[in-house]
């Protein structure tokens, strides 16, 4: 393995025996870049470890773990082992599409010192390696993003969720050292959680080049739209939403959300916190229910402090009565169908109760002696 390389390429592997050799080769084929290649297996039950071990190259260091602990844990261990100034990640079932991928991204980073991470677009392939037209995939254009300011990236994340292709990344290792690594308690969105933390502190750049062949394995990828993944994704969005605006200062809030603020001048820090809470009540086709749940709790806390209560009432006409109305209007714990069924059940119970009362024998009234 190389000493003091410029770039550390990391690859967590898990049960990708048919694809991992191609993924490895796409890294070893990189030209014009000084890199080490760190690979760690997360307890595969197929031949993945054997396939990786069969590839001999002095740039490779392989850590064949036998216990499955979670992709983020393995990824974080590789980040901690990395000695490069920059870190690139690749999934063990994907492959980089161009041999100058690393050299190109390093040049972008050198020329733009304010950029913390560089991403690219993706083309897609099936299990057999055949390319899939983006138009045939519901998420085909997700990674085709224009560049934005940090505030506008936050707005994009808040409105629509993840849109950056993780296995195209080249990131400064110092960003991980500053922000922390990935949260293994999240399965669907550990990268999205990272991007939110990242753009609060650093610019990012998305190239218009397609830098990866992203393999789509129906029912297998963590990104596949199974019922379990969909439910887990919504729950993780709720968890992330709780701290979405943490450490977002006045300047960043104005940069990303000025058009949605009710008091756009933000004359005090109290106004900043109030506007953050109110953003959760914005209309959102995908995330309205988890956001409004977070918004209710945020407003509950603000209304409990006198310094916020005065401003809320004077500048926003928000009082406890407003909160009562919101808690009656926002049905966060049940679907509307559940509420309708419950109300229908209550009505039926009431009618049946009246019928029962009409046919129940009653004791004669007591007579006075």
Image: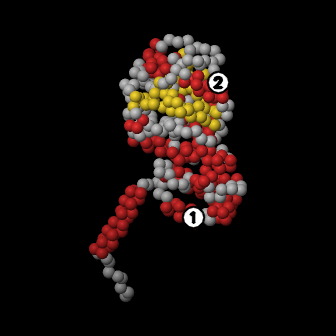
Residue 126 placed where, x, y %? Answer: 38, 29
Q: Secondary structure at mark 2?
A: loop
| Mark 1 → mark 2, Cα distance in angstroms | 52 Å
Residue to which mark 2 is pinned: 85
Which one is nearer the viewer's eye here, 35 or 71? 35
Q: Is residue 318 above or below residue 42?
A: below
- Residue at x 66%, y 38% (from the top left corner): 201
Tag shown at residue 301: none
- Residue at x 67%, y 65% (from the top left corner): 314
What is the quadrant of residue 100 in the picture?
top right
State yes or no: discs 1 and 2 in contact (Cβ < 8 Å). Answer: no
Can the viewer see residue 251 in this picture? Answer: yes
- 46 relative position to 78: left or right: left
- 272 relative position to 21: left or right: right
Q: Please tell me which of labels 1 and 2 falls first in the chain.
A: 2
Which one is nearer the viewer's eye here, 74 or 219? 219
Which quarter of the rendering shows the C terminus? bottom left
- Residue at x 44%, y 43% (from the top left corner): 231
Q: Is residue 65 above or below residue 219?
A: above
Q: Secondary structure at mark 1?
A: helix
Can the viewer see residue 10 in this picture? Answer: no
Tag shown at residue 322: 1
Q: How is the image coloured?
A: secondary structure
Which quarter of the rendering shows the N terminus? top right
- Residue at x 50%, y 62% (from the top left corner): 328
């Amino acid at each position: 393995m190389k000493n003091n390389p410029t770039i550390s390429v990391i690859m967590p592997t898990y049960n990708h025996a048919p694809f991992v050799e191609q993924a490895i080769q796409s890294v070893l084929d990189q030209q014009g870049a000084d890199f080490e290649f760190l690979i760690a297996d997360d307890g595969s039950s197929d031949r993945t470890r054997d396939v990786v071990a069969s590839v001999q190259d002095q740039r490779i260091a392989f850590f064949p773990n036998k216990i499955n602990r979670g992709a983020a844990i393995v990824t974080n261990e590789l980040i901690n082992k990395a000695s490069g100034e920059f870190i690139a990640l690749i999934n063990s079932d994907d492959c980089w599409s161009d041999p100058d991928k690393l050299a190109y991204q390093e040049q972008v980073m050198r020329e733009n010192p304010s950029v913390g991470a560089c991403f690219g677009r993706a083309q897609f392939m099936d299990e057999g390696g055949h390319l899939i037209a983006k138009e045939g995939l519901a998420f085909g254009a997700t990674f085709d993003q224009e560049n934005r300011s940090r505030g506008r990236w936050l707005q994009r994340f808040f409105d629509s969720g993840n849109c950056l292709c993780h296995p195209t990344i080249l990131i400064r290792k110092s960003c991980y050292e500053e922000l922390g690594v990935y949260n293994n308690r999240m399965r669907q969105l550990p990268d999205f959680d990272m991007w939110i933390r990242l753009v609060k502190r650093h610019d990012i750049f998305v190239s218009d080049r397609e830098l990866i062949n992203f393999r789509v394995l129906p029912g297998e990828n963590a990104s596949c739209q199974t019922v379990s993944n969909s439910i887990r994704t919504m729950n993780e969005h709720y968890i992330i939403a709780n701290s979405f605006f943490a450490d977002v200062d006045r300047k960043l809030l104005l940069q990303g959300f000025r058009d949605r603020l009710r008091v756009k001048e933000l004359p005090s820090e109290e106004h900043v916190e109030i506007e953050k809470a109110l953003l959760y009540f914005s209309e959102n086709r995908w995330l309205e229910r988890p956001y409004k749940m977070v918004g209710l709790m945020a407003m509950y806390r603000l209304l409990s402090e006198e310094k916020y209560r005065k401003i809320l009432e004077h500048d926003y006409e928000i009082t406890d009565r407003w909160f009562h109305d919101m808690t009656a209007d926002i049905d966060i714990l049940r679907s509307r169908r559940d509420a309708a069924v419950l109300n229908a059940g209550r009505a039926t119970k009431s009618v049946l109760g009246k019928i029962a009362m009409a046919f129940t024998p009653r004791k004669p009234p007591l007579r006075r002696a």
